Image (spheres, grey):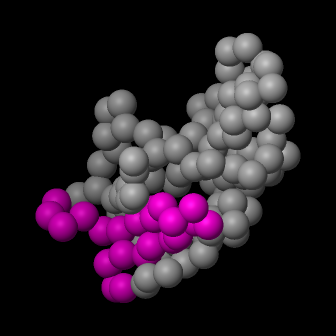
Amino acid sequence: MLSVARYGTRDLARATEFYDVIAALLGARRVMERDELVAYKGADGGMFLIGLPFAGEASVGNGSQVGFSAPSRDIVDAVHAEAIALGGTCEGPPGVRGPDGPNGFYAAYFRDRDGNKIMVMRVGP
């Protein structure tokens, strides 16, 4: 259902440095770059945009979160670790959420350098 998500940033160069690494780990690539916006596209066709707001200062949404699918639990772990190493903050370490059956939900949560909340997850082993 979701085709695109966007977060605002106060510093596009700094945000791009962060998301270039995260996108590469998830198998996504940069597909658009403008003075005010960078867009990444994953293998499934969904796009994530990070950019300067149209008006005013970028601020963190209360209750806002974007989720990225990972191809494996190991990638969930790697993305979370890299996000923290790049200056993000942990909002929940990698682990199983709920029952861990064959379709178990495995996720990690972090905030980017601007404070935007991200979930990276894998459904399945």
In the image, is 5 to the left or to the right of 78? left
In the image, is 82 to the left or to the right of 60? right
In the rendered image of this protein, does residue 58 appear above or below residue 81? below
Q: Which residue appears farthest toward the left when viewing the image?
A: 55
Task: State the count of labels.
Answer: 0
Q: In which quarter of the image is residue 76?
A: top right
Residue 50 lies in the magenta stretch: yes
At which x and y percent is residue 52? Answer: 30, 68
In the image, is 69 to the left or to the right of 115? right
Q: Which residue appears farthest toward the bottom when viewing the image?
A: 34
Residue at 32 percent of width and 78 percent of height: 36
At which x and y percent is residue 55? Answer: 15, 64
In front of the other: 45 or 56? 45
Work out whether residue 27 can be spotted.
yes
At which x and y percent is residue 44? Answer: 57, 61
In the rendered image of this protein, does residue 70 appear above or below residue 57? above
Residue range of the region highlighted in magenta in the rendering: 34-56
Work out whether residue 81 can be spotted.
no
Residue at 74 percent of width and 28 percent of height: 103
Please state, as top left, top right, bottom left or bottom right, where the C terminus lies in the image.
top right
In the rendered image of this protein, does residue 123 appear above or below residue 33? above
Q: Which residue appears farthest toward the top when viewing the image?
A: 99
Residue at 58 percent of width and 49 percent of height: 68
Residue 71 lies in the magenta stretch: no
Residue at 53 percent of width and 51 percent of height: 112
At which x and y percent is residue 73? Answer: 80, 41
In front of the other: 123 or 113? 123
In front of the other: 29 or 82? 29
